[in-house]
Image (cartoon, grey):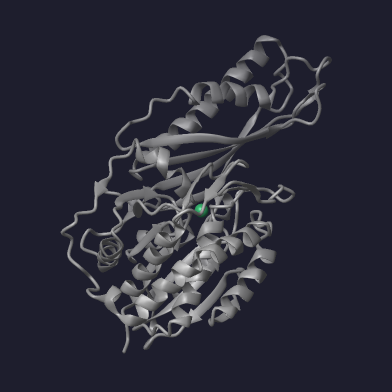
Amino acid sequence: MNLRTRDFLFHLAPVKSVALCCILALMAPLSARVPSRAIPATAKPGAQGISADPRIAAALELLKDAADATTEEQIRITEIPAPPFHEEQRAAYLKKLLAAAGLSVEIDSTGNVIGKMAGADLNDIVLVTAHLDTVFPAGTDVTVRHDGSRLTAPGISDNGTGLASLVAVARAMHEAKIHTQKSIWFVADVGEEGEGNLRGMRALMDAYGSRFKSVIALDGSAVDYVATAAIASRRVEIVITGAGGHSWSDFGAPNPINALGRAIAKFVETHLPDNPRTTFNIGDIEGGTSVNSIPASASMKVDLRSEEESELPVLERELRADVQAGVDQEMAASRARGMAAGRAPLAISVNVLGVRPGGQLPQDSPLLAAVYDADRALGNRSRAERSSTDANLPLSVGIPAISIGGGGSSAGAHTTSEWYDPTGRELGLQRVLLIITGAAGLAP
Ligand SMILES: [Zn+2]
């Protein structure tokens, strides 16, 4: 599937201002509907013999022993709130953890926690990220509840798993004295979810993009796939405004909520292609001030996604047309009641909240070979998938990037009933380590 149609589709949006969000934990339901490629068992090895190196063997053993401690750390991380645009408290904690893992750590002006592990080459960098932020607003109860081996809390896996894995793998590499050819930056980054619009990854790309040779995003738990293609998305906010009025004395005056309702009723009937899979979501609506007032405004936030970027402008045109039709119908209804004359007509404004480009890792990428090698060494099977994560941004500009899970199992991402089960998580931790070291190469 060709996703590289960005140039003419999003010519208004600079590539570097593009972003996208994480849906990794949604991949299980998604994978049932999206065709995926099985990774061939005969794929060419990219970093042959890495798992036979005694330092790597020692690190793999350390990770196995550290599985329970990693879960304890994941619980502590999850219980530090990290609502959108307020990751500071969790960032400060990750800074301590990454420093304790032997890295040289700083927090950049965007809020990213950057832990550096120097390789033989300081300029070539393998960037490993795990996003700090959650989708949950401030005040959400993030207490982790225990039920057998299952842990339940908002953000427990997305991205508690990624963050705990980031720290565990850095520590194991440090303790096993693994020295790599390329340098490795372990980064807990901000703004991956929703309206964060990848601001953390965008800042990293703006500042250091040319030095990143591979990008590995740790997101969620799954080890049965590797995300090698980025789903394109576009998020818009539609705002309809009017003069407002009294519910009784101004009855019949143009009502923005009525117009928005008419628009939504029309838009949700839009026919979407199955292939390329294309979706929309109306995720947030607001409007009005009281039950007995005609509102002065109504708004909605809409998420549009597709495997094929060229579908997004088509869908957005439909959305804008339906909003216009909803307003036109409401104005016609108001005129029919004799209440439109002398009043300001309803007005529409559209704000683009986020644009995330598509992109695809080439089949012959050495980074993908490192994944094949890791899976072979661990007896794991995984398939290539699509997702919307921090990896989208580097993929969109041709930097090899993947998104992988940290091990264990989970479900319910982006809901308050999200759960994580750490059973078998060591496989994921070891897989992360082998992929990172495969991408960075071992130095003597
Ligand atoms: Zn995530």
Residue 67 at x, y percent in the picture: 50, 64
Numbered marks: total: 0
Where does the image place residue 87, in percent across and percent down from the top left? Answer: 65, 62
Residue sitting at 65 percent across and 28 percent down?
346
Relative image position of residue 278 (x, y in whole percent): 38, 36
Camera sees residue 205: no
- The residue closer to the viewer here, 316 or 221, is 221
The residue closer to the viewer here, 366 or 249, is 366
Q: Residue at x 53, y 70 (%)?
A: 167
Whole-percent x and y of residue 214?
36, 70
Residue in the foreground of this view, choosing between 169 and 35: 169
In terms of image quadrants, where is residue 71?
A: bottom right
Q: In this view, does 103 lie above or below 421?
A: below
Q: Residue at image x 39%, y 71%? A: 60
Tell me: 285 left or right of 361.
right
Vertical placement of residue 257 versus 155, above or below: above
Q: Can residue 413 be seen in this view?
A: yes
Looking at the rendered image, the quarter that the C terminus falls into is: bottom left
Name the residue at 64% across, 13% down.
333
